[in-house]
Image (spheres, coloured by chain):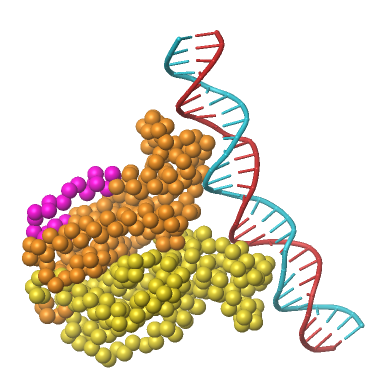
Chain colours: A orange, B yellow, C cyan, D red
Amino acid sequence: MPKDTFFRLPAERRDRLVREAIREFADRTYAEASLSQIARRASIPKGSFYQYFEDKLDLYRWLLTDEVPRRKRAFLGDVDADADFWRVLETVVERGMAFLVEHPELARLAAAAADPTAIAEVRGLHRSICDAGIAEIGALLDRGQKTGALSKSLDLALSARLVNAIIGRGLTDIVLHELGAELHEVLASEALRKKLGPKRRARLAAQAVALIRGGLDSSAD
Amino acid sequence: MPKDTFFRLPAERRDRLVREAIREFADRTYAEASLSQIARRASIPKGSFYQYFEDKLDLYRWLLTDEVPRRKRAFLGDVDADADFWRVLETVVERGMAFLVEHPELARLAAAAADPTAIAEVRGLHRSICDAGIAEIGALLDRGQKTGALSKSLDLALSARLVNAIIGRGLTDIVLHELGAELHEVLASEALRKKLGPKRRARLAAQAVALIRGGLDSSAD
DNA sequence: TCGGCATGCGACCGCGCAGTCATATGACCG
DNA sequence: CGGTCATATGACTGCGCGGTCGCATGCCGA
C-alpha cells in the first residue's frame, strides 16, 4: 500500500505521478518499467517517490488492484442483469470493446500485466484479476443456464474460460485487425480510435455473440 | 542470420548454446533476457558468442523463425486433410495440447514472445508467426465450408481469429487450470505433465470442439 | 619451420537501473 | 523565537547489462 504521505499529496502532483506510472507500466513489462523514468516524466525526484511508495512493486500493486479497477468500474457501470441473456452478453462484449478505444492506456496496462515471465507476485496479481473476470462470466453463464438460454449440458467452468478467451484475446485481436493496427498505435492515434465507433462495435459484438451462441456447424443454416 | 562460424561449431557446443538460449528466452521477455546469462550457462564466453551471432536480436530471430518452427513441425507432423472436418479439428487441438506438455519450453518461449511491449521487430516476428497460424486455421475452415461441414454464412476471417483464440489462449488456460499450475510449473514438473495424458487431452479437445461446433445455445439440446 | 587466418576468450566500457541517505526546507507549536 | 516533525531532494552505491577489443591459441598449407 502507498504510504500516508501519498494520499496527502496535492492532487496535481499525485495525478502526474499516477498518469506517468500508468504510461510507463503500459509501455513496458513490470520488470522493464523504470521508476527513474516515471519520476523524471512526472517531474518528481526519485527520493520523493520513496516517500509515497515502499518500492516499485508497491506502486504496481496499488495501480492494478485499486486504481485501475476503480477507473474500469467507473467506465463500465453496472450490467442490467435482468435483460435477455444474449442481449446482456452482447452489451458486455460491446462495452469491452468500447473500453479498448476509450481507455487504450488501461487496456495496454492490462495486456502488459499478462506477461507470463514476470515475477511470482506480479503473475499472482494478474491471475487474480483474470480469475475475477472468469468468475463474472461464469456467473453470467450460470444465470443464462437457469433462465433456459443456455444448454443444460454445458460444463460451465470450461465454457466460462472459452468465452473469456473469445471476448478477451479473440475480440482484441479482431478489433486490432479491423483497425489494421497494434494496441500501441491505437493508443497513439485518436483518428484510429474513432474508426471503431458504437455502430461498428455493435456489429462486431453481434457477430461474435452469434458465433458463441450457434457455433460454426452448418446445421445452424 | 547466424554467422557461418556458428554452423561450423561442434554440435555439442552449438546444442548447449541453443538449449540455454531457449531456456533464457522462455524464462524472460526478449528485453529482459540476458546474453550474459545464456553464455554463462552454456559455458561459452561472451566474446565467442559474438563470433556466432550479430547480436541478441540475431539469435532471437533465428530461434523464432528457424529453430522453433523446425522443432514444431517435427513434433506435429502433417495433418490428414482428407479426414472429416470436425475430426481434423479435434486432432489439431489435441496435438496442440500435446505440444504444450511435451515441449513446455517451446510453448513458454512462444508465450513470452507474445509480449506486446516488445520492440517493433520482435512484435513483428510474433505477429507473422500468429498470422501464419491464423491463416492455417482459415484454410482449414475454408475446406470445412467447402465440404459442407461449416455454415455457409460464416465470416471466415473473423471465425478463424475466434477459433484461434479458443484453441490458443483458451485451451492453454483450461489445460493449466485443469493441472492447477502455471506454464512455469508445468515446465518444471514431469509429474504434472504426465497428468495430461492422451486420454485426458482427447476428452478436452472433444469438449472444446463441441463448443466451437454447436455453440452455447439451448436449442442444441 | 613459419606465417596467416579462423576462432577463443575475458577484461573492459558506458549505461541505466532500484533503492538509500544525508541534508535542506518549511509549517506548526509553545 | 527555537524546536520538532513531515516532507523534499538529488548525489550516490552497487549491480548487471549489451557490446567491444586486443591478445591468445591452434590449425593448415608452403
Out of B199 and A89, give the one closest to the viewer: B199
Image x and y of residue D15, in percent: 62, 52
Image x and y of residue D29, in percent: 80, 89
Image x and y of residue A84, in percent: 8, 59
Q: Is residue A186 left or right of residue A24?
A: left
Out of A170 and B100, give the one closest to the viewer: B100
Vertical order, B184 against A19 (above or below): below
Seen at 47% across and 35% down, the residue is A51
Whether residue A77 appears in magenta in the rendering, the answer is yes
Whether residue A81 appears in magenta in the rendering, the answer is yes
Q: Is residue A66 left or right of residue B150?
A: right
Q: Is residue A181 left or right of residue D30?
A: left
Q: Is residue B12 left or right of residue B175?
A: right
| Residues rendered magenta in the picture | A70-91
Residue found at the far front of this picture: B191
Seen at 27% across and 76% down, the residue is B204
Image x and y of residue B119, in percent: 47, 60
Q: How many numbered markers are drawn?
A: 0
In which image quadrant can residue A11 be found? top left
The secondary structure that most of the magenta stretch takes on is: helix
Out of B146 and A124, give the one closest to the viewer: A124
The answer, for residue A28, to whether it is visible in the render is no
Quadrant where the N terminus of chain B is found in the figure: bottom right
Seen at 14% across and 80% down, the residue is A218
In which image quadrant can residue B150 be found? bottom left
The answer, for residue A212, to whether it is visible in the render is yes
Seen at 12% across and 70% down, the residue is A151
Quadrant where the C terminus of chain B is found in the figure: bottom left
Vertical order, A157 against B154 (above or below): above
Vertical order, D11 against B214 (above or below): above
